[in-house]
Image: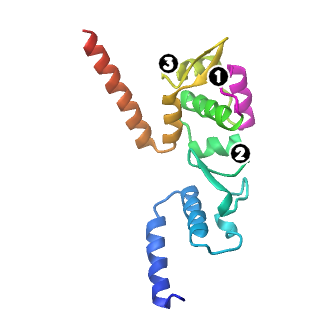
């Protein structure tokens, strides 16, 4: 049954209103999802496809908010660009997440994080060991034995929250409240 022209206009207005406040990558995910769910047919319009890796609606998976072709991975550069880390600890944690989830390397050394940082075309760390210590001090990384590190649950939550600064700040506030409760319980 064909929609009446005024119904189409109302649908367009509602869609525009709902999507206008989203970030470009969020808009793409929503449009691809709608394309598939509404069974429009054919390839999705090129404007909704990622330039880094073309996707079709049926191939979209969402992992930490990153659209990817099933079986393929986003580039390290695009992953960090989307996550927008602000501190060295956040960037190291993003790199650790990428190694763990996209390069199937759950245990890694600082040298591997440095190499991935270069691959991602990110600025060099002035002291990579200190950046790793900062991430570990923030409880985003933990020892995995043999000098290796691994990403923690808190580190995973950080990456899931990025780039939303409100979510990141909320996550940090929860951690501070827990730490304060533990200290007051010991006294």
Write the residue at 69% across / 19% down.
109
The residue lying toward the viewer, choosing from 179 and 111, is 179
The residue indicated by pointer 3 is 137
Residue 159 percent across, percent down from the top left: 53, 37
Residue drawn 52% across the image and 30% down it = 155
Mark 3 vs mark 1, CA separation in Å: 18 Å
Q: Could you say which quadrant of the image residue 186 lies in? A: top left
Residues drawn in magenta: 104-121
Helix, strand or loop under label 1: loop
Q: Would you place residue 67 above or below residue 27 in this image?
A: above
Would residue 114 be counted in the magenta stretch?
yes
Which of disc 2 and disc 3 is earlier in sequence?
2
Q: Which residue position is annotated with label 2? A: 73
Provide the secondary structure element on which disc 3 rests.
helix
Indicate which disc residue 117 carries. Answer: none
Q: Residue 88 at x, y = what percent?
A: 57, 28
Mark 2, secondary structure of its residue = loop
Residue situated in front as seen by the camera: 176 or 104: 104
- The furthest residue to the top: 187
Residue at the spot 40% in from the left edge and 43% down from the top edge: 166
Residue 119 image point, x, y percent: 75, 35
The label shown at residue 126 is 1
Determine the residue positioned at 49% across, 22% down. 139
């Amino acid at each position: 049954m064909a929609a009446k022209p005024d119904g189409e206009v109302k649908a367009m207005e509602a869609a525009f209103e709902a999507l206008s406040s989203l970030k470009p990558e969020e808009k793409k995910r929503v449009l691809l999802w709608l394309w598939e769910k509404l069974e429009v047919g054919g390839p999705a319009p090129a404007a909704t496809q990622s330039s880094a890796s073309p996707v079709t609606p049926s191939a979209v998976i969402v992992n930490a908010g990153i659209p990817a072709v099933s079986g393929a991975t986003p580039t390290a550069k695009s992953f960090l660009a989307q996550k927008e880390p602000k501190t060295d600890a956040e960037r190291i944690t993003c790199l650790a997440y990428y190694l763990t989830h996209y390069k199937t390397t759950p245990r890694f050394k600082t040298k591997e994080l440095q190499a991935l940082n270069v691959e991602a075309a990110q600025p060099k760390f002035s002291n990579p060991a200190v950046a790793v210590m900062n991430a570990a001090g923030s409880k985003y990384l933990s020892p995995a034995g043999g000098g290796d590190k691994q990403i923690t649950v808190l580190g995973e939550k950080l990456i899931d929250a990025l780039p939303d600064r409100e979510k990141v700040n909320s996550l940090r506030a929860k951690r501070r409240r827990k730490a304060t409760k533990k200290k007051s319980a010991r006294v």
